[in-house]
Image (cartoon, coloured by chain):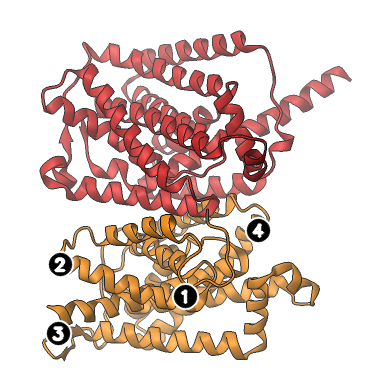
C-alpha cells in the first residue's frame, strides 16, 4: 500500500513536473498563465491518434508528429493572441482561457467528444517494484519527464538561446537593452512549451483517455505546482511537481480518490496564506 | 478594465433617468418574454438569468477589476441551495434567503483567502475554487444525487409569475450595479481598479472593499442560481461546471466590464446566439472563445465602449 502510493505519486509527480515546467517557462518570459496549454495537449494527443490510426504511421513517428503539432499550435497562440496582451497583465489570464475554449472545442468539433485511447506498443505491459504494480506507460512517463527535464536544463544553462530566455525571464527590459531579440525568445519559449505539451500528450494520453477536455483539470493542478515553485522558476516547478504528485497520491489512497484534485487546492490555499512568494523562489514575484 | 479605463466615456442623464430607463427596459423585456413563443421565450429567460449572474460579477470584476472566475460556483450554490432547502421542507422564500446566505458565506471564505492575491493569482485561485465546487456537486452523492441531478420543487404560483420575476430581477440587478457604482463602495472599487497601491496610500481600506464587493457578487450570483433552478425544474452539476464561471466572465468582458448594461449585452451574445442558432455546445463555446479573444484584443472595453465611440462620433458629425 505504502510503496504503491509512493510509486503512484512519482508517476503523478512526473506528470505535474512536466506540465509545470512548460507553464512556468512561458510564464517566465511573458507573464501569461498559459491555460491554453491544456488545449495544446489535447490537440497534440489527437494529432498523435490521427497519425497513428487514420494515417497508419508507426507509433513513434505519430508521437513525434504530435509533438511538432503541439509546438506549432503553441506558437500560433502566441502569434495570434498573446502578443497583443503582453502589456495588459489583467487580460492575459482570460485570453488564455479564451484560447483554451477555442482549442478544446476545435478538438471536439474535429474529433468528437468520445473517450478514445492512444495505445503505444507497450500499452499492456506491467512492471513490479516489490509489491507495487507500475504500468509500463507510467514508467514511460517517468522516463519522458526525466529526459525532458535534463534536456531543458542543459538547454537553458548551456546554449545561447537558453541564456537569452533566462535573461528575458529575469528582466525583459534589461535583456532588450542588451540586444536580445525579445520576439524571438517569446516564439522559442512557446515552441518549447508546445513540445513539452506534446510530451505530456504522449505520456499522459495512454494512461487515461484522449478526449477534448482531457487536460483541463490536471492543468489546474499544474498551476498549483507553478505557484508552489515560484512563478517563472523552472527548477522549483520540477521539485514541487513531485511533491504535489506524492501528496495527491497518498491522499487518494488514504483519504478519497474522488477528491484527489482537492488536495492540490488545499496546498494552493496554504501557499497563498503562508508563503505567497512560493517555496523555492529567490527573486520574488509579487503574489499578494 | 485592462488598463484602458482612461478613455471610458459615459453619457450622463442624471440618476433618476438611468433608473427609469432600466425599469422601462425591464418592462419591455417582460413583454417580450410573455409574447414570444416557447422557444424564444426560453432563450430570453436564460439570457436574463445570465444577466443577473454577470451583473453580480460586474461588481467585483467590472468595478473592482478583479478577474473572478468563480461566479459559476455561486450560481450553483444558489440553485442547489434553494432546491435542497425546499426538499427539506422549507418554504420557497426561506429557501431563497438561505441559498443566498450560503453563497454569501462561501464568498466570504473564498474572498478572505483570495482577496490577498492579485491579478493572475486571483484568476487561478478562483478558477480552482470553481473546479472544487463542481467536484463536490458531482461527487457528494447523498446530497446532490451526483451527475444525475435533482428535481426542483416549483415555488411560484404560476409560470406567469416566474416569467415576471425573471425580468424584474434582471432589471434590479442592473440597477444594483448602477447604484453601487455611484456609492462609496463603487468609488473605492474603482480606485482599486485604477491603482491598488495608490488606493491603499490614500486610505481606501482595500482588503475590506474587495471582500464586500466579492460577497455582494456572490449573493447576486446565487439569486440567478435560484431562478435557473426554478426555470429548469431539474438541475445537474454540468450546468455549474467550473468553466461556467469563466464563460460568465467572458460574457461580462464582451458586453463591457464595469458598465451597467454590459452584462445584458454580453449575455445576449454569449448565451443568446448559440441558443438561437441552436448550435451544439462545442460550436457555441468555440464561437464564444473566438468572439471573446477578438473583443479583448480589438475593443478592450467591450461592446459598450464600441457603442459609446459610435455615438460620440455620430454626435460630432451632427454638430458639424
Comes first in the chain, label 2 or label 4: 4
Q: Secondary structure at mark 4?
A: loop
Comes first in the chain, label 1 or label 3: 3
- Which shade is chain A? orange
Q: Is residue B86 left or right of residue A9?
A: left
Residue A250 rendering spot, x and y as whole percentages? 21, 71
Q: Is residue A48 visible?
A: no
Which residue does the numbered mark 2 point to in the structure image?
A: A254
Which residue does the numbered mark 3 point to in the structure image?
A: A132
Q: Nearer the viewer, mark 1 or mark 3?
A: 1
Which residue does the numbered mark 1 point to in the structure image?
A: A236
Distance between the Cα atoms at labels 2 and 1? Answer: 27 Å
Which residue does the numbered mark 4 point to in the structure image?
A: A86
Q: Are marks 2 and 3 on the same chain?
A: yes
Rendered red, the chain in question is B
Chain letter for the residue marked with disc 3 in the picture: A
Amino acid at each position: 500500500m505504502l510503496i504503491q502510493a509512493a510509486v503512484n505519486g512519482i508517476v503523478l509527480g512526473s506528470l505535474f513536473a512536466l506540465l509545470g515546467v512548460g507553464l512556468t517557462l512561458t510564464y517566465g518570459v511573458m507573464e501569461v498563465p498559459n491555460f491554453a496549454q491544456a488545449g495544446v495537449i489535447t490537440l497534440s494527443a489527437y494529432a498523435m491518434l490521427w497519425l497513428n490510426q487514420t494515417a497508419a504511421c508507426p507509433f513513434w513517428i505519430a508521437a513525434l508528429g504530435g509533438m511538432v503539432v503541439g509546438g506549432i499550435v503553441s506558437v500560433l497562440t502566441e502569434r495570434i493572441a498573446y502578443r497583443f496582451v503582453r502589456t495588459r497583465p489583467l487580460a492575459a489570464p482570460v485570453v488564455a482561457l479564451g484560447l483554451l475554449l477555442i482549442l478544446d472545442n476545435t478538438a471536439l468539433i474535429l474529433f468528437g467528444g468520445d473517450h478514445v485511447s492512444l495505445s503505444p506498443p507497450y500499452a499492456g505491459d506491467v512492471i513490479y517494484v516489490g509489491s507495487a504494480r507500475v504500468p509500463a506507460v507510467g514508467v514511460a512517463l517517468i522516463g519522458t519527464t526525466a529526459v525532458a527535464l535534463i534536456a531543458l536544463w542543459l538547454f537553458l544553462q548551456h546554449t545561447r538561446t537558453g541564456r537569452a530566455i533566462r535573461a528575458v525571464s529575469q528582466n525583459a527590459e534589461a535583456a532588450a537593452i542588451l540586444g536580445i531579440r525579445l520576439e524571438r525568445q517569446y516564439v522559442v519559449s512557446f515552441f518549447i512549451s508546445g513540445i513539452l505539451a506534446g510530451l505530456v500528450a504522449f505520456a499522459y494520453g495512454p494512461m487515461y483517455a484522449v478526449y477534448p477536455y482531457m487536460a483541463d483539470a490536471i492543468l489546474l493542478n499544474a498551476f498549483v505546482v507553478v505557484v508552489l515553485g515560484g512563478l517563472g522558476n523552472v527548477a522549483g516547478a520540477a521539485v514541487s511537481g513531485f511533491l504535489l504528485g506524492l501528496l495527491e497520491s497518498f491522499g487518494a489512497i488514504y483519504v478519497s480518490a474522488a477528491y484527489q484534485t482537492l488536495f492540490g487546492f488545499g496546498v494552493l490555499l496554504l501557499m497563498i496564506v503562508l508563503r505567497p512568494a512560493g517555496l523555492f523562489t529567490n527573486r520574488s514575484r509579487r503574489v499578494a | 478594465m485592462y488598463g484602458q479605463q482612461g478613455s471610458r466615456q459615459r453619457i450622463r442623464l442624471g440618476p433618476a433617468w438611468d433608473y427609469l430607463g432600466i425599469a422601462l427596459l425591464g418592462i419591455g423585456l417582460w413583454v417580450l418574454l410573455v409574447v414570444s413563443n416557447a422557444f424564444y421565450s426560453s432563450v430570453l429567460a436564460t439570457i436574463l438569468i445570465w444577466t443577473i449572474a454577470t451583473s453580480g460579477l460586474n461588481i467585483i470584476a467590472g468595478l473592482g477589476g478583479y478577474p473572478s472566475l468563480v461566479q459559476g460556483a455561486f450560481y450553483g450554490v444558489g440553485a442547489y441551495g434553494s432546491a435542497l432547502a425546499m426538499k427539506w421542507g422549507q418554504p420557497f422564500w426561506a429557501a431563497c434567503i438561505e441559498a443566498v446566505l450560503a453563497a454569501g458565506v462561501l464568498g466570504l471564505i473564498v474572498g478572505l483567502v483570495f482577496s490577498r492575491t492579485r491579478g493572475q493569482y486571483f484568476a487561478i485561485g478562483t478558477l480552482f475554487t470553481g473546479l472544487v465546487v463542481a467536484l463536490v456537486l458531482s461527487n457528494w452523492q447523498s446530497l446532490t444525487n451526483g451527475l444525475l441531478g435533482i428535481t426542483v420543487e416549483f415555488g411560484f404560483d404560476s409560470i406567469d409569475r416566474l416569467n415576471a420575476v425573471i425580468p424584474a430581477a434582471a432589471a434590479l440587478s442592473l440597477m444594483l450595479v448602477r447604484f453601487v457604482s455611484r456609492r462609496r463602495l463603487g468609488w473605492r472599487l474603482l480606485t482599486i481598479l485604477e491603482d491598488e497601491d495608490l488606493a491603499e496610500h490614500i486610505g481606501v481600506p482595500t482588503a475590506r472593499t474587495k471582500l464586500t464587493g466579492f460577497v455582494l457578487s456572490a449573493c447576486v450570483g446565487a439569486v440567478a442560481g435560484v431562478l435557473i433552478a426554478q426555470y429548469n425544474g431539474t438541475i445537474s452539476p454540468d450546468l455549474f461546471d467550473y468553466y461556467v464561471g469563466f464563460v460568465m466572465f467572458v460574457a461580462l468582458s464582451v458586453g463591457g466590464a464595469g458598465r451597467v448594461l454590459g452584462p445584458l449585452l454580453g449575455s445576449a451574445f454569449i448565451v443568446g446566439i448559440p441558443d438561437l442558432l441552436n448550435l451544439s455546445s462545442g460550436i457555441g463555446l468555440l464561437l464564444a472563445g473566438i468572439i471573446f479573444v477578438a473583443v479583448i484584443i480589438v475593443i478592450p472595453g467591450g461592446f459598450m465602449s464600441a457603442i459609446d465611440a459610435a455615438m460620440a462620433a455620430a454626435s460630432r458629425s451632427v454638430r458639424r
